[in-house]
Image (spheres, rainbow, N blue to C red):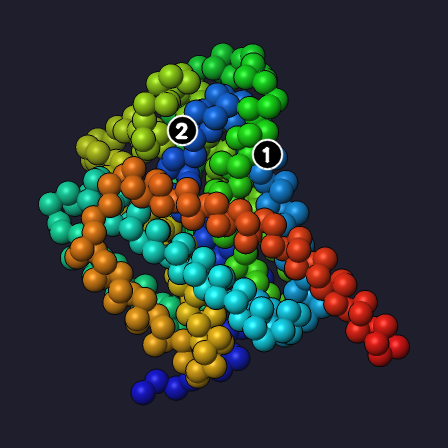
Amino acid sequence: MRRPLSLKDHEISFTQFVFTIYKTQIGVGILTLPRDLVEATGTDGWISLIFGYAIAVTASVLIIAAMSKYPNDTLYELLPRLFGAWIGSGLSLLWIGYTAGGALVMLLWSVHLTQVWVLPGISNQTLMFLFVLPICLYTFQGLKLVGRFGEFVYLSSFWMPLALFWGLKDAHWLNFLPIGHNGWGNIIMAVKSTLLSFLGFELAFILYPYLKDKKKAIRGVVLANTLALITYSIATVVSFLQFSEETLKEYVWPSLVLLKLIRLPFVERFEIIFVALYLIILFATIIPYLYMAAMGANKLLRTSNHRYYTIAFLAGCVVLSMLFRPSFWQLEWMGKQYGKAGFLLVFLFPVFLWLWGIGYRFIRKERHP
């Protein structure tokens, strides 16, 4: 039997805080966002991306503002404190379902990408089994190892977005003109697509209490969102410069199509190698979400070890892979449903929690002056 995790197993540094959030945000979005934006508002999508970034930063700062009043509480401890046992437990259950759903969707995407681009002959359940083993090991060890994994993924994959600049050699700069040609209404409507790509900053709900230097928390979430903006901007702008609007709408994975343009004397299909290496970025999204779900179940059921819930979830994923092999369109539908839940919980809930916390403290002062 493994020992229960101590506080030292959870303490994270500022860089671990930043890179864990940033790498959670960079999932499948970088591969599909250019197509989503061009369908919504054409090549004006880069403007929507900036608006989405501003909203994500605002929500992130509100999370830190709400958590800073109770610096030693994670979200799952804060909710019962502010809303009472029953409502707090219900909200905790929603967050557990949301984060577990995020881990599941990303796992299914990882399997699908590998089958389409790298290993088309391998079975669903075999890939799922191979993926859950390293995920299980990292999720077992506490937030410190999760944070270290985020650092490792950043250092080993920072070059990946830069590889997309290869597409600039045949750039068509006139594709951006005229700016605003689809109207500001469409630009504002496209912001929703960009918001879903910034999901991941909500990890601050569980990372903040274990951050060693909490004074840097706001700087950390702003930096993480800024890194995500830069990464998404590279993929979006280069795709817009390389392809026309109509052409871009036809590509399911426009960022991977860009990589097909890369020709090296020692590599015939660079995009296959890219996808294989990109799996560690997908794992960097799955592991924090799974950890947040397992921690929530552990707090909700008042048990001493989150590992049981991790094993149960991953075993369920392996069983599901034997029964269900989703297509791209099914996965996209699942992603959209997950995104709707994320919009409510991640962007609206921090505002509500911040306002509720202000009211809660005011009532306590009135009762106990």
Q: Looking at the rendering, in which quadrant would you find the C terminus?
A: bottom right
Mark 2 / mark 1, whichever is N-terminal: 2
Residue bearing mark 1? 50
Q: Residue at x 29, y 51 (%)?
A: 108
Relative to the observer, which residue lies in front, 19 or 342? Answer: 342
Residue kind at label 1, given as amino acid type:
Ile
Relative to the observer, which residue lies in front, 145 or 50? Answer: 50
Q: Is residue 218 left or right of residue 38?
A: right
Residue bearing mark 2? 35
- Classify residue 298 by image quadrant: bottom left
Confirm or deny contact between disc 2 and disc 1 (CB under 8 A): no
Q: Residue at x 17, y 57 (%)?
A: 322
Element marked by disc 2: helix
> 10 Å neighbourhood of mark 2: few (<14), some, or many (≥20)?
many
Q: Is residue 180 visible?
A: yes
Q: Is residue 323 above or below residue 112?
A: below
> 10 Å neighbourhood of mark 1: few (<14), some, or many (≥20)?
some
Residue 252 location, x and y as percent?
31, 31
Q: CA distance from mark 2 to mark 1?
A: 17 Å
Residue kind at label 2, given as amino acid type:
Arg
- Classify residue 119 by image quadrant: top left
Q: Residue at x 53, y 80 (%)?
A: 7
Q: Residue at x 35, y 41 (%)?
A: 333
Residue 21 location, x and y as percent?
51, 55
Q: Is residue 106 left or right of residue 59?
A: left
Q: Is residue 78 visible?
A: no
Residue furthest right as drawn = 369
- Classify residue 113 by image quadrant: top left
Residue 32 has which mark?
A: none
Residue 144 location, x and y as percent?
47, 70
